[in-house]
Amino acid sequence: EPDEFLQRLNLGAPTEKIETKELSKKKKGWTRLVNFFCSFVFDPFSDMYYYWLSIISLAVLYNFVIIPARVSFKELEDGQFFTAWFAIDIVADIMYILDFLASFRIGFLERGLLVKDTKALSKKYVRSLVFFVDCISIIPTQFIYLVKNPAVPFVRPLVRIIKLLKIHRVVKFNDRTECRTSLPTAWRLLVLFQCMMMVMHWNACIYYFVSEELIGPNRTSEFLYPREMDNDNISNKYSNLSMKYAYALYWSAQTMTTIGEVQQPTDIWEFFYLTLVFLTGVMIFASVVGSIGNIITNLRANRSVFQDRLDHLKEYMGYRNVGKDLQNRIIRWFDYLWAQKHTFEEEDVLKYLPDKLQAEMAIHVHLATLKQVELFQNCESGFLIALVLKLKHQVYSPGDYVCRKGDIGREMFIVKQGMLQVTGDDGRPLAELSDGSYFGEISLLNVGKNGNRRTANVRSVGYSDLFCLRKEDLLHALNDYPEMREVLKEAARKKLARDAKPQKDEENQDNERRISFTNSVELADTIGKRLEDLEKMVLLLADDVKRTNKNVVTLQKQIVKAFPSALPVSSSSSSPVTSDDEHEE
C-alpha cells in the first residue's frame, strides 16, 4: 500500500492507468489472446523484459558450454547423451524463435516517451544488424541429423555454432544486471570468473579435438593428449570421458596461466599452437589481474578514504600534543562512524541526480524519522522538499552537549537515532529526547521571551545521530514559502507552551522548597539574634544589680558614720554587711 506521508507530498512515480475496453462476451478466448499479442509491447526498462533476457541468456550460455564439448568429445553424441542433448537443443531453439518474435515488440524511447507503435518497432528492428544475426541464429540445425553416418561425425554438432551469434543478448543482460544489482562488485567478480572458465573450457576442448581428431589415435608426441590404448590395444585410464575432460581442462589452465611445467612441443605446428595459447593466456591473465585489482580497489575505496582521514587526524593530534583522553574520544567517534556505515558523503553520491530525485531519495531514506516530526505534519510539500535537501547529518559522542542554554541559536536538530537529555543548569536531567524528537526551532524562529537564545541544555547520552538544519537554509526556504513562517511559529509556540507547563510546575516546586528553606534559615537567624539580645540584657541586668548593691552598702556606711548613736546595734548588725561587702569587693 502507498504511504500516506509520501502521497501527501506527491512523491513517487505516478502509476499509469491503462484503460482497457471491455471485450464483448461473444468474443472467444483465442480472439482475446490474439488481440493481446497484437498490441503487446515490451518496455525495455521493465522487470518483465529483464526476466526474459535472463531466460534467453541461459539458453545462449548452454550453447556456449555444450557445443564445443560435443564437437570434441564424441561420446557426448552417442548413446544415452544424444537423446538428452537433442531435447534440450529443441527447447533452446524454441526460445531463440520466441525471442526473435519478441524483438519486433521491444519499445524504444523517442523524445523521452516510449514508442508503442508496432509498425515503427518492427521497422526499427528489421533495419538493425541484430535482425540479420538473429535470422541466422534461428536456422534449425536438427535436420543435419537426418544424414546417417556422415564422413565427419563432428560436423553435426559443429553446425550449431551459429547459435553462438546470440551472444549480444548475454551482453545486454549483463549490463542490465550490473545496473540493477545492489552488489555490483560481486556481480563483476562472478562475470569475470565465468569468462575465464569459459575460455579455459574452449581451450581444453580444442586441445583434445586436435589430439584426437586431427592427429589421430596413433599420436606419439608427449605434448598431446596421452594415447587411450596400450600397446596391447587395451583401454587404459585415459579412455574414460571424465578423465579426458579433466586432463584437458588441467592442461588448459596450466598453459593459460603459465603455472607449472608443460611438455615441450616437438613439431612446428605444436610450437605455433602453444605460442598462440600462451599469448591468449597472457592477455586473459593480464585482464583478470587488472580487473580483480580494480574490483579489490573499489571494495576498499571507502575504507581507504576513511583510513586516510583518520591517519591524517592522528598525525595532527600528535603534532599538536593533544591529550590522550581527547584522542581516544575522537578515535572512538571514527570507529562508530565506520561501524554504522556513516562514511558516505551523501552530497557527493546524490549530486548527479536532479533536485526532484534528490528530494525523493532523501525523503525515502529518512521517511521513518520525518514521519515522527510533528513540525512537518502541516507543512506544504514544496517547502518540506526544500528543507529535506538542506538537512545535514551529524553524530555526537556520549556526554557531548549539542547546545547550551543562552547560546545563540543558529540551527535546529532532528533526532534520527539515539538518546539525548534536556538538563538544568546544575546538570540534573529534566527530560529525554528520542527518535523523531526535534529541538532548537524556538531560538531559530525567535519565539518566546528568550529570542534567538537557547532555552535549555541538551546533552547526548550515547552516540546520537542527528539531522541539522541551519538558520540560513530555513530562511532561504521561508523566502520562497512565506506563509510557512506562521505555521512553523504556531507549532513552535504550542510546543513551547506544552513544554513550559511541566517546567513551570517544577520551577514552582523548586521555588516552594527554596522559600521554605529560606524561611527556616531566616527563622533560625532571628531566634539566634533574639537569644543574643536576651543574653546581653541579662548581663546588663546583672551589672545593674551589682551597682545597686554597691550603692546600698555605701549608703549604709555613710549613715553609720553620720549617726553612730542612732543605731546601737549597728556595729553588730553592720559587721556582717561590711564583712559581706568586703568579701564581695
Image (cartoon, grey):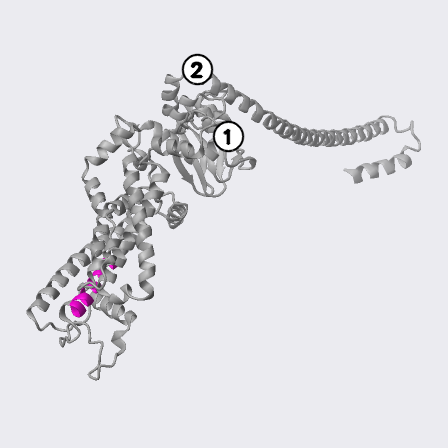
Left or right: 388 with respect to 175? Answer: right
The alpha-carbon separation of the residues under discs 1 and 2 comes to 28 Å
- The residue drawn where x is 39% and y is 26% is 385
Q: Is residue 160 above or below residue 378?
A: below
The dot on residue 456 is 1
- The residue drawn where x is 25% and y is 79% is 235
Question: Can the viewer see residue 33 in this picture?
Answer: yes
User: Residue 391: x percent and y percent?
Assistant: 39, 31
| Residue 207 belongs to the span the image colors magenta | yes
Determine the image quadrant of residue 497: top right
Tell which of 358 and 503 is nearer to you. Answer: 358
Q: How many marks?
A: 2
Choose mark 1 or mark 2, whichever is in front: 2
Tell which of 73 and 552 is nearer to you. Answer: 73
Q: How would you rate the neighbour count of disc 2 (Cα within 10 Å): few for under 14, some for 14-19, many for 20 or more? A: few
Dot placed on the residue nearer the N-terminal end, 1 or 2: 1
Q: Amino acid at mark 2?
A: Glu
- The residue drawn where x is 20% and y is 67% is 208
Left or right: 65 with respect to 10? Answer: left
User: Residue 40: x percent and y percent?
Assistant: 35, 33
Tell which of 217 and 274 is nearer to you. Answer: 217
Tell which of 336 and 196 is nearer to you. Answer: 196
User: Residue 558: x percent and y percent?
Assistant: 82, 27
The dot on residue 426 is none
Q: Amino acid at mark 1?
A: Ala
Q: Is residue 19 above or below residue 84?
A: above
Q: Residue furthest top?
A: 483
Q: How would you rate the neighbour count of disc 1 (Cα within 10 Å): few for under 14, some for 14-19, many for 20 or more? A: some
Q: Is residue 566 above or below residue 174?
A: above
* Region of the chain picked out in magenta, as a range: 197-213
Q: Quadrant of the C terminus?
A: top right
Question: Can the viewer see residue 317 in this picture?
Answer: no
